């Protein structure tokens, strides 16, 4: 079978716990890619602290780039690095455990014109909880989504312009739903789910929902202030009409209504302030990152030069 020579494929592997596979195991898993496409690049995004353990593998993988980032960079931002560095017409961002389970290479061959493709496993209880909590977020945050995403290079700008880069390369965003397909993956993901990552994801749910949370809070506090004012007017009318009431009722009512109004106005003011602040936080911004070290064995470039008959 002849190889596809019209596309460049970028496959970005994000570091996962455990030892990096040896060359034979890596190339075996990548056979569906290497046997079908002439031009491809392999990006390995890894933390610099793990470089010594992988020194025997670094120089043996063809068409590869090992990009070593700071040890403090988290898993989700490493995906953003991969999206920023990839050069292919089609970009796959994934992990080795996810690679075999999603069938992403089959979707790559289908090439049916979808801009951004996500893969989602069977949903469970945790998925339902996160979807409920993320109902105010503009991202479809759901741990049932796999670690794999398939993007056209021409569509990467739709992700680059989104705020919260931690989430942009992991979950669908409402603004891109018309350009997005979600592939159901029947096989459940195996292995222990990282609790720290789940906790960080929960924080992301809150962060990405700030605008909606404070909007509802401001509306609720305004409504509470209106109730407080109404109760104050009611207490004043009762007092003025001379209706018999329990001793101290009027005083307690005035104090209570005043407290409700003041507290509501305080919450309303804070909510309006944080609404502005939340908008400032979530404005699209350039993603800044630092590649501490790079190991290149990218013979892909010489292939492309030869294909294009480039002459120095």
Image (cartoon, rainbow, N blue to C red):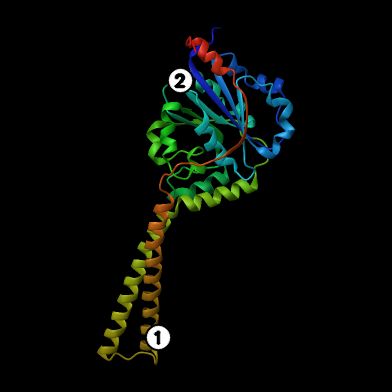
The location of residue 294, given as percent across then percent down, is 62, 31
Label drawn at residue 111: 2
In this rendering, the count of numbered labels is 2
The one of 177 and 64 positioned closer to us in this rendering: 64
Q: Tell me the SS state at disc 2.
A: loop
Q: Which mark is residue 252?
A: 1
Q: Is residue 168 left or right of residue 58?
A: left
Residue 37 in sight here: no
- 10 Å crowding of disc 2: few (<14), some (14-19), many (20+): few
Crowding near pointer 1: few (<14 within 10 Å), some, many (20+)? few
Residue found at x 38% / y 90%: 246
What residue appears at the point 41 percent right and 68 percent down from the top-left corner? Answer: 267
Mark 2 or mark 1, whichever is nearer to me: 2
Residue 58 rendering spot, x and y as whole percentages: 68, 26
Q: Quadrant of residue 24?
A: top right
Residue 186 relative to residue 160: left or right: right
State the residue in front, 83 or 100.
83
Give the residue displayed 48% in from the left and 19% down from the top.
110
Locate residue 244, reporting x and y percent: 32, 91
Check the image and report above or below for 186 versus 299: below
Please say if 130 is above or below 107.
below
Alpha-carbon distance for marks 2 and 1?
A: 71 Å
The earlier-in-sequence mark between 2 and 1 is 2
Q: Residue, x 52% and y 28% (percent of image)?
A: 86
| Residue 40 left/right relative to 295 | left
Locate residue 28: give its quadrant.
Answer: top right
Marking on residue 303: none
Task: Give the answer, above or below, for where 282 lies relative to 301.
Answer: below
Which quadrant is home to the N terminus? top right
Numbered disc 1: secondary structure: helix
């Amino acid at each position: 079978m002849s190889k596809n020579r019209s596309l460049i494929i970028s496959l970005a592997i994000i570091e996962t716990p455990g030892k990096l596979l040896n060359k034979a195991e890596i190339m075996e898993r990548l056979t569906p890619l290497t046997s079908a496409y002439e031009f491809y690049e392999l990006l390995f995004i890894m933390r610099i602290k793990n470089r010594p353990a992988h020194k025997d593998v670094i120089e043996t993988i063809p068409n590869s780039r090992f990009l070593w980032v700071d040890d403090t960079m988290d898993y989700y931002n490493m995906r953003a690095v991969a999206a920023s560095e990839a050069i292919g017409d089609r970009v796959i961002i994934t992990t080795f455990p996810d690679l075999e389970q999603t069938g992403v290479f089959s979707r790559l061959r289908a090439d049916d014109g979808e801009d951004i493709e996500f893969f989602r496993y069977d949903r469970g209880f945790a998925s339902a909880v996160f979807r409920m909590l993320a109902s105010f977020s503009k991202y479809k945050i759901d741990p049932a989504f796999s670690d794999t995403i398939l993007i056209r290079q021409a569509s990467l700008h739709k992700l680059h312009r989104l705020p919260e880069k931690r989430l942009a390369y992991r979950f669908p965003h409402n603004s891109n739903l018309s350009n997005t397909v979600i592939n159901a993956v029947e096989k459940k993901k195996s292995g222990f789910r990282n609790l720290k990552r789940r906790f960080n994801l929960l924080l992301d749910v809150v962060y990405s929902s700030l605008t909606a949370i404070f909007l509802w809070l401001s509306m609720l506090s305004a409504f509470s202030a209106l109730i407080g004012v109404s109760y104050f007017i009611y207490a004043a009318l009762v007092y003025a009409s001379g209706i018999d009431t329990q001793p101290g009722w009027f005083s307690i009512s005035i104090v209570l209504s005043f407290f409700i109004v003041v507290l509501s106005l305080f919450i309303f003011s804070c909510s309006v302030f944080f609404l502005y602040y939340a908008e400032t936080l979530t404005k699209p911004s350039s993603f800044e990152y630092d590649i501490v070290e790079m190991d290149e064995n990218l013979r892909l470039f010489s292939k492309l030069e030869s294909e294009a008959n480039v002459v120095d």
